[in-house]
Image (cartoon, rainbow, N blue to C red):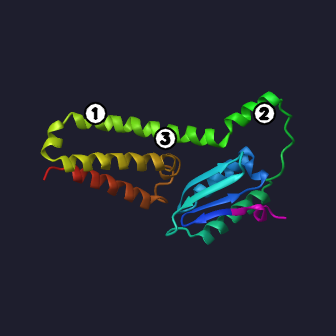
């Protein structure tokens, strides 16, 4: 039975799919190889592999890479790994004590992990918002003269920070490494900053 047949589609909407994956893919090296391979596909902008839950979540741009193309490239990637022997089972690990299992279970508890991740994202966003607010407070006359424009400028800054935070891993790990391949993403990024600067110019 090929490894591809052990992938079970659990969720699918436009631009987002989630698979139940076999245990072999949850190996550290294999998981990294699968994640890196999927991240290099045109149109894929976020890949999350949850080893403890044996789940693979992929977010992609339907206009660049539809679901059939994504599935085909995923299965080709798995076939290549299988051919290279990267999916061979590893030796059974040494059993851990019940104390280690208890600690691991607590750390891997679904709600706790999700809360930690969301709290970290929210904390970073709030810190950035505080910085923007302080910068805005240095020019109180701008709010008095045109409160609508001041509010719009503030919301634009928040949106830019959110977009950069959302795509930061892709920017540092893929866009900078292969700028020509991701030229359209760079064009969109530069255009976004152009609109931001243009909106700040005095009429």
Name the residue at 59% across, 53% down: 47
Q: Quadrant of residue 85?
A: bottom right
In the picture of the structure, the residue carrying the numbered disc 2 is 101
Give neighbour class at mark 1: few <14, some 14-19, many 20+ (Cα, 10 Å): few
Q: State if disc 1 and disc 3 touch (CB < 8 Å).
A: no
Above or below for 105 versus 80: above
Mark closer to the chain start, 3 or 1 = 3
Q: Where's the N terminus, which quadrant?
A: bottom right
Question: Which quadrant of the structure image shows residue 91?
Answer: top right
Q: Judge from the rendering whether residue 161 lies leftward or rightward of residue 6; answer left or right.
A: left
Q: Which residue is rendered at x = 52% and y = 51% of the image?
A: 174
Residue furthest to the top: 99
Q: Which mark is residue 112?
A: none
User: Which residue carries the number 3 mark?
Assistant: 121
Q: Is residue 137 magenta?
A: no
Give the image quarter of residue 188.
bottom left
Q: Residues within 10 Å of mark 2 (few under 14, many from 20)?
A: few
Horizontal and vertical percent for residue 192?
Answer: 33, 55
Which numbered disc flags the more N-terminal residue, 2 or 1? 2
Q: Secondary structure at mark 1?
A: helix
Name the disc covering residue 134, or none.
1
Magenta region: which residues?
1-9
């Amino acid at each position: 039975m090929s490894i591809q047949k052990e992938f079970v589609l659990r969720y699918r909407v436009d631009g987002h799919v989630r698979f139940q994956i076999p245990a072999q893919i949850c190996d550290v090296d294999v998981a990294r190889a699968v994640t890196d391979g999927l991240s290099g596909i045109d149109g894929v902008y976020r890949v999350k592999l949850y080893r403890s839950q044996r789940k693979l979540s992929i977010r992609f741009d339907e206009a660049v890479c539809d679901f059939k193309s994504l599935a085909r490239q995923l299965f080709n990637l798995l076939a290549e790994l299988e051919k290279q022997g990267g999916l061979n089972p590893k030796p059974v690990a040494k059993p851990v004590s019940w104390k280690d299992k208890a600690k691991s279970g607590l750390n891997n508890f679904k709600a706790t992990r999700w809360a930690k991740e969301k709290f970290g994202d929210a904390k970073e966003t709030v810190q950035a918002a505080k910085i923007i607010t302080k910068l805005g407070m240095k020019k109180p006359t701008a709010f008095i003269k045109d409160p609508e424009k001041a509010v719009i400028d503030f919301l634009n800054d928040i949106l830019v920070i959110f977009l950069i935070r959302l795509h930061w891993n892709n920017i540092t790990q893929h866009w900078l490494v292969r700028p020509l391949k991701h030229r359209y993403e760079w064009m969109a990024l530069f255009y976004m900053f152009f609109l931001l600067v243009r909106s700040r110019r005095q009429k």
